[in-house]
Image: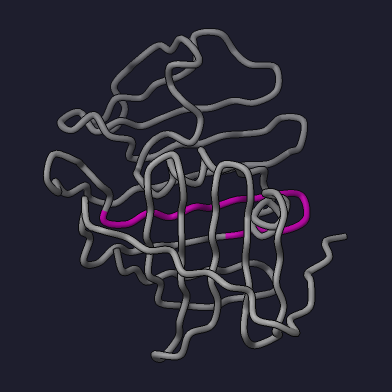
Amino acid sequence: ASMSVRYKSDNESTSLNASLRMIKDSIIWLSFSKLGFPLAKLKITPFEVQFYEKIGKSYFKGDFELISEWMDAEFDFEKIQNLILGNPIIKLEKNKHVANVYDNKYQLLPKKRNTIFDIKYLIDPVTFKILEEELNHLEKKQNIRVFYGNFVRINEYLLPKEFRLLVKGVNQTTQVEANYKNVQLDVPLKFPFTIPEGYKNIVLK
């Protein structure tokens, strides 16, 4: 897919174009550019994150600590994949829920309250896809909300046209917006990724 992506935090705001390639449960590859100039690449597997950016000539190779720092929240491969595909970040089947009607949508709440976090979902009554997901982390005083735009059918799949992720933490507020364009499924893919020589390793504090 081609995408437009906007990232905003308390200290930074940027809008980029992105090319997304993905094999479900295996690899997520993103190439970022602005005004036609390539800026960065990101490759994620269930076990590793690799990233480099050309302006500062820096790179990272390691676990999901880098993405969790960007988002000011803990993310792993499954959560990122679910976000891209329009699925719940926290799997529904892990807990029992009660359903009610809220604003002409189905609202799902955990049947038994979790002592660590509160979570709720709003479900489209026609497609049964997630429209909104909210997670309140009681210990970390952190609020995570995901909003999905219209879903479109491509082949046999329902995929979101857009999503917005909003993370409010103790230290900062982070927002990511993504709009999908030209989505194709079941096509041959390559994942070119080579960290250029001379780039400096990103050291996280």
Residue sitting nearer the eye, 98 or 153: 153
Locate residue 191: give its quadrant: bottom left
Q: Is residue 132 above or below residue 169?
A: above
Indicate the position of residue 84 as horizontal and vertical percent values. Answer: 40, 49
Magenta residues, start to end: 161-174
Indicate the position of residue 40 as horizontal and vertical percent values. Answer: 55, 76
Assess whether residue 149 is covered by the magenta stretch: no
Assess whether residue 165 is covered by the magenta stretch: yes
Indicate the position of residue 46 as horizontal and vertical percent values. Answer: 56, 42
Which residue: 55% across, 53% down? Answer: 44
Tally of marks = 0
Q: Is residue 159 above or below residue 41?
A: above
Residue sitting nearer the eye, 148 or 152: 152
Q: Is residue 119 left or right of residue 186?
A: right
Residue sitting nearer the eye, 98 or 79: 79
Question: The N terminus lies in which quarter of the figure?
Answer: bottom left
Which residue: 33% across, 40% down? Answer: 131
Which residue: 72% across, 78% down? Answer: 58
Residue with the most extreme right position:
205
Dominant secondary structure of the magenta stretch? strand
Residue sitting nearer the eye, 68 or 48: 48
Q: Is residue 185 left or right of residue 174?
A: left
Indicate the position of residue 23 as horizontal and vertical percent values. Answer: 37, 48
